Image (cartoon, coloured by chain):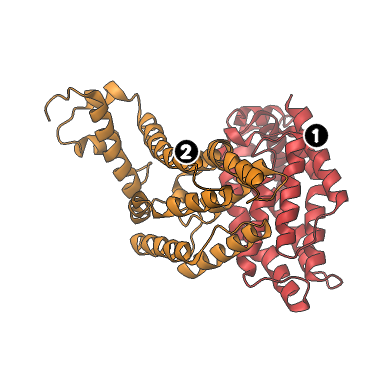
Chain colours: A orange, B red
Amino acid sequence: MARNKHPEETVNLILDVAFRLIMEKGYEHTSIQDIIAHLGGLSKGAIYHHFKSKEDILVAVIDRITSESNQMLAEIRDRSDLNGNEKLKAIFRESITRPVQNDIFTAAPDFHNNPKLLFSLLHDTIENAAPNYILPIIEQGISDGSIQTEYPKQLAELILLAANVWMNPMIFDSTEEESYCKFMVFRQMLQGFGLDIVDDEILVRLQELTSIYQKSKQ
Amino acid sequence: MARNKHPEETVNLILDVAFRLIMEKGYEHTSIQDIIAHLGGLSKGAIYHHFKSKEDILVAVIDRITSESNQMLAEIRDRSDLNGNEKLKAIFRESITRPVQNDIFTAAPDFHNNPKLLFSLLHDTIENAAPNYILPIIEQGISDGSIQTEYPKQLAELILLAANVWMNPMIFDSTEEESYCKFMVFRQMLQGFGLDIVDDEILVRLQELTSIYQKSKQ
């Protein structure tokens, strides 16, 4: 490969390849050598110019996925045409319909073998996504009358923990039928808080993702 | 120390010391040498007679705590004088009032530095405690009319995930006020499922545990 004049393109290329390999083989079984082998001639030195270690690459891969997701969350949070309840619904739908989800679920990464990924997801959920994106929306919903709660911060955390962690088949293995049941319990939980953000279209999509994941795992 | 004729006592002694040190210093900062230094003359050979590695000791420590907790859960599950709703309430109260909880919260272990402990807790919650203890109780509650749900397995998981993981100040740092808010949201969630298992006595005890933890951390 010719020497790249645009270092950010090199970085993105490394992250694309690393993401795919980590998804396919798991972090533990992906070596720097594997990544190089899939970079069409980029040297080991070129990688180490940008990343100190394999762990550095993993952190950058996760940062990039998180930042894409945060951008989507921010766009919906900042819309002026929706009330709080509608924004929550939009976020939930958008989260599961983004095309990247098909890639992730097809790659079927196994969080059981990757405590670091799980840890990172859990903490990003509670310490970043909940307070920075879901909380302001719930606060807006309290103001505009579309959401009723006295504890917006904690409600934001509980909803995201259930959606991102518990309902995630990559973390807790579920059959399609079990996914459906989780989804119904999640819907009932939200209704208990007066929230109506889950509809049949979302249900169909969730089952689709679970099905993609189950087929890919085999 | 004299040679112990009862190997199970030696094992228990090693686990007592290891538990305390891991709680105080964290797993990463506890060495086999530390454990030996607190065993009053037991040799390195004696430890390695029972455990292959430090990780082996950690696994045994966690197994012992889990098995004590499971025994309590089984006793309540198997009582014949309570309906399903009352059993859930008894389990919740018993879980937070056991004296060992004061020790654990005083020791204030930091799960942030210990992905393995977190991983183990998360999986024990969903794969052991929920299906083996909470699920049969919810099923009893459906039969005796004290609990209404179409999805007992998933409800069991969601309740325990919230209680064991989200409301656990060792996993997600919370001030006393935040703990109170989480608790109120948890109560509201349970009420949404028609469950009334949380009362003011439990609330006071939860705040007490959070307070013990916050003071110990300083």
**Looking at the image, which is closer to me, A140 or B204?**
A140
Residue type (three-letter) at the residue carrying disc 1: Ser
**Residue B56: % across, % down:** 57, 43
How many numbered marks are there?
A: 2
**Looking at the image, which is closer to me, A27 or B214?**
B214
Residue, disc 1:
B211
Query: Is A140 drawn above or below residue B21 in the view shown?
Result: below
Residue B146 vs residue A67: left or right? right
Q: Residue at x 39, y 39 (%)?
A: A68
Query: Is A61 drawn above or below residue A24 in the view shown?
Result: above
Which subunit holds the residue at mark 2? A
**Residue B209: % across, % down:** 80, 39
**Residue A106: % across, % down:** 33, 56
Q: Residue at x 65, y 47 (%)?
A: A155
Q: Residue at x 12, y 30 (%)?
A: A1
Which subunit holds the residue at mark 1? B
Q: Quadrant of residue B141?
A: bottom right
Residue B99 vs residue B28: left or right? right
Residue type (three-letter) at the residue carrying disc 2: Ala
Quadrant of image for the N terminus of chain B: top right
> Mark 2 packing: few (<14 Cα in 10 Å), some, or many (20+)?
some
Quadrant of image for the C terminus of chain B: top right
Instruction: Give the number of the disc on residue A74.
Output: 2
**Looking at the image, which is closer to me, B175 or A14?**
B175
Evaluate whether residue B117 shows in this view: no
Label 2 vs label 1: CA separation? 35 Å
Do the residues indicated by labels 2 and 1 lie within the same chain of the protein?
no
**Residue A40: % across, % down:** 15, 36
Instruction: Give the number of the disc on residue B105.
Output: none
Pick out the residue farthest to the left: A2
